[in-house]
Amino acid sequence: MANAKDFTKILLDESEMPTQWYNLIADLPTPPPPPLHPGTLQPVGPQDLAPLFPMDLIMQEVTTDRYVDIPGEVLDVYKTWRPSPLYRARRLEKALGTPARIYYKYEGVSPAGSHKPNTAVPQAFYNKKAGIKKITTETGAGQWGTALSYACALFGIECEVWQVGASYDAKPYRRLMMEVFGAKVHRSPSNLTEAGRKLGADPKNQSGSLGIAISEAVEMAAKDPSTAYALGSVLNHVLMHQTIIGEEALKQLAKVGETPDLLIGCTGGGSNFAGLSFPFMREKLAGKMNPEIRAVEPASCPSLTQGVYAYDFGDTAGMTPLMKMHTLGHDFIPDPIHAGGLRYHGMAPLISHVYELGLLTAQAVPQTECFEAAVQFARTEGIVPAPEPTHAIAVAIQEALKAKESGEEKVILTALCGHGHFDLAAYDNFLSGKMVDENITPERFAESIAKIPAVK
Ligand SMILES: *Cc1c(COP(=O)(O)O)cnc(C)c1O
């Protein structure tokens, strides 16, 4: 076996790439509570979801099979950038003077620059197979919209994206990249939908939110049988598609004889975190390793650490099924922080359930600490992280410094789920000393939490 001490970058061959996604639900002591129809409060059945999603994806949403084969057409596309590299952060470790060994699984090598194509590609594939002509979606930071635009271009499907207003204004290059891939992009709230017109009339909604953009995209898809809707996070099938990250990381660490003591990922809707951690959770549940698995969220949108575990809508207008999740309330509008991908009021029902089962821990971090960590990371490792994974990096650095005090040779694995090449305005804000931390007094969350529908 190779020695961990010799490696900076641990690669897999194409032939070693996993060929199945992993479904954590198969290994949990209890399944997550089902989504409910908001009218009847009965569990949502496959036919309820059919106006929005192709049946293959609906079946993946509800399956209890442990593994699902990745279609050959999807594997062929994955090979454009997968297997992705696992790096050891040697220079960061040295700068921190820590005995900890820090590894990061880097998803910024994908065409969109993040982990999102891992699910955008199969979603476009299954929609094409079902004869769908157009896909609508929302995008927060622009990463998901970019990934879906790319995937739709590969499979010859039209793509229409509602980009959260704050992000549309701050990130013209993300919009342009989507347009290069052939997508049509709208600023949300827009005048094109009933939800957009209604919610857009309230001045507090002008910067937009993921919840509002989802309402707009869902409304458009529900109206037209040849149009489907795609979500870049939160749903079971999305989390499952991302597990290729963790499956690869398991193999990569095994190559150098390492077992992680701590896994850290940032959580918006939970997909990159689930993607890295669920295969390790399987090993943990099987008693083969015992890492702590920690979700890191922004202090301004702390659904796990400050939200309540309740049935709530996935969107602001209340058009989606009710999902049991940790939520700050569906009409909560987070501060317009730079990590746009983490500005979601809820958390994936599956992550929420696993958190309730005590299988993971959670922590919230304010954005200035995240950018301090990101700059230190960039100046040692040479990669400029997207604002979202700076949350994971900040906690990796906190933990590496604790290990320095205790002298512990801790093995830390983080998800570096995207690069920040389109986020340099955020870095400008930080470097020029203008970045402020968020308002996180409990009153900030109380009003929207009080409006969560009462469902037993
Ligand atoms: C979308 C996105 C996120 C947030 O979504 P998750 O589903 O929580 O992963 C985080 N980081 C990056 C780079 C993203 O593009």
Image: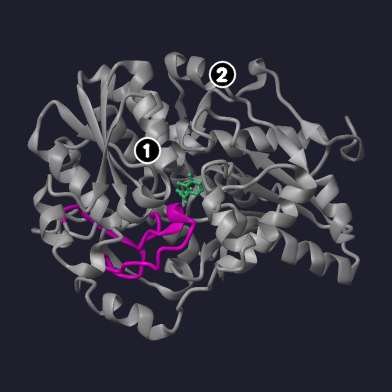
Q: Position of residue 368 (x, y in %)?
A: 60, 67
Circle 1 — which element?
helix
Circle 2 — which element?
loop
Residue 95 in which image quadrant = bottom right
Return the residue found at the far front: 432
> Is 48 placed above or below 16 here?
below
Of marks 2 and 1, the one in the foreground:
1
Q: Position of residue 201 (x, y in %)?
A: 13, 63
Residue 342 shown in magenta: yes
Q: Residue at x 13, y 49 (%)?
A: 191
- Mark 2 to mark 1: distance in Å? 26 Å
Residue at label 2?
Answer: 79
Is residue 193 left or right of 174 when viewed as pictured?
left
* 314 or 193, nearer to the observer: 193
* 86 or 430, nearer to the observer: 430
The three-letter amino acid code for the residue at tag 1 is Arg
The three-letter amino acid code for the residue at tag 2 is Lys
Residue 175, numbered circle? 1
Residue 428 visible, this angle: yes
Quarter of the figure with the N terminus: top right
> Is 63 placed above or below 35 here?
above
Q: Which residues are magenta?
A: 319-348
Is residue 415 left or right of 146 when viewed as pictured?
right
Residue 58 in which image quadrant = top left
Main secondary structure type of the part rendered in magenta = loop
* 1 or 9, nearer to the observer: 9
